[in-house]
Amino acid sequence: MISKNKLKELSKYKTGKFCDQDDVFVVEGSKMGVEALMSDFEITTICATEDWYINNRTLIRKKISPENTYEVNDSDLERITALKTPNKVWMLLKRQLSPAVETQKNQPTLVLDKIQDPGNMGTIIRICDWFGIRNIVCTPDTANCYNPKVVQASMGGIFRTNIIYTNIENYLDQCHNNNIPIYGAVLGGENICNIKLNDKNIAIVIGNESKGISPNVQQKITHKIMIPNIGGTCESLNASVATGIICHEFLSK
Amino acid sequence: MISKNKLKELSKYKTGKFCDQDDVFVVEGSKMGVEALMSDFEITTICATEDWYINNRTLIRKKISPENTYEVNDSDLERITALKTPNKVWMLLKRQLSPAVETQKNQPTLVLDKIQDPGNMGTIIRICDWFGIRNIVCTPDTANCYNPKVVQASMGGIFRTNIIYTNIENYLDQCHNNNIPIYGAVLGGENICNIKLNDKNIAIVIGNESKGISPNVQQKITHKIMIPNIGGTCESLNASVATGIICHEFLSK
């Protein structure tokens, strides 16, 4: 059972303001809940239906003390959820942003230049998870990775990627100093199908949904690339689709 | 100038119900507005700000009679828009669904098995536009291509693709009878990187976001494929990202 006061307290996390203030984020739904239990993230609160609690009690007991776990029913969940249809579990987790890029051999780092749509951001994190890319370096004005829409769209990728918000121009300068090639899709770039990577220790820059890669960042690109535009009538691909195609082309072969 | 009564009449198209009833759909925003003017779709109403009207008057005059064109200001637009921030123009267009697949040589047909998210649906239409795929055959419960979110996410692709809602199992039976190979991503499929297509006259089936390709449809697949899962921790890719990667792999080389 959960008290009305506790429900009221937790419902404030529907808005990003209190999540920012308390340095936490919300994870919802049965599948994402299990991912959270198996992650190395600290869970501060779990509200779950009885059946979900029973099915996952071993994982839950390992991860969180009983006084921070509440059994709820569907109408309790409706009071705290940000989803249209809540699904068995709602959790609060401590944010775990990294200050630095982690060493990862023979894998690219993805560099996001002002990706603004939370759906795109989450989908890009999911793509990194799929391709085993650990580091995502973002401009400070890229969508907040702890926005509930980003978390949901990442499909658990949020727990397995290392996301750094920083000045990407400085980061790309460091890449340059360390002889790490910097790839980015710009007008007149080389067809990605013709590029064979021997060393996958590269940076891949993905530009903003409507403006592409900003001029200052374009200057840092050492390898201009393009995805062939077969139809010829469409101006651009969605940012996350372009990310998926570039990662597949560079990493699947 | 536009009358209050006219604004009230047009504001009903914020909900899908009246669009369905009148067999129309809404297009909004400066860029999509220009795409609509250049398309072969019939435009029944245009509400535009003075500057947008002036910039596009030649196209507008060719396409629609003056009595169906209204000059509006930003607060008028706010009354009829479904967007958070309306952008210069709002249009009503006649729907133009095709009953049949159009002949297109050496290009795939995309077959959508219950794609439900409007964002995914719009992004898939944009991908088809990018790769020059004309025909998209969908189950009747696939997202409505005239949903405003689909229209916006298609970035004009809605005007250049031929979308057919039908029984896809019957359609795939026809493909089979005409010796058209049917590709679909399923467990244990062949790595798409190892497939070289000589004839691109194929069908590519894309499955539902959470359930994948339904069992009845899976039985129709003649060529099972898979996108290599490099990371190994992530269960699946987003439906539109998977579509982009498959189309790129099959069509860009």
Image (tube, coloured by chain):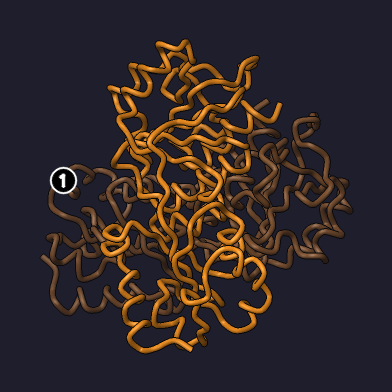
Chain colours: A brown, B orange
B141 is higher (above) or lower (below) than A174: above
Query: Image quarter for residue A54?
Result: top left
Which residue appears at 75% of the width and 31% of the height?
A193
Q: Nearer the viewer, residue A107 or B251?
A: B251
Q: Is residue A190 left or right of residue B106?
A: right
Residue B99 appears at what percent x and percent y? 38, 36
Q: Is residue A173 left or right of residue A74?
A: right
Q: Around disc 1, counting alpha carbons within 10 Å, would you say few (fewer than 14), some (14 to 19), or many (20 or more)?
A: few
The disc labelled 1 sits on which kind of residue? Ile
Which residue appears at 41% of the width and 40% of the height?
B98
Which residue appears at 41% of the width and 57% of the height?
B94
Disc 1: host chain: A
Q: Which residue matches tag 1? A: A54
Is residue A99 visible to the viewer in this orientation of the structure?
no
Residue B54 appears at what percent x and percent y? 66, 79
Numbered disc total: 1
Give SS at disc 1: helix
Query: Image quarter for residue B235?
Result: top left
| Quarter in which the N terminus of chain A is drawn | bottom left
Q: Nearer the viewer, residue B21 or B171?
A: B21
Is residue A52 visible to the viewer in this orientation of the structure?
yes
Query: Image quarter for residue A21?
Result: bottom left
Which residue appears at 36% of the width and 34% of the height?
B113
Q: Nearer the viewer, residue B104 or A18?
A: B104
Residue B157 appears at what percent x and percent y? 55, 49
Residue A25 appears at what percent x and percent y? 41, 65
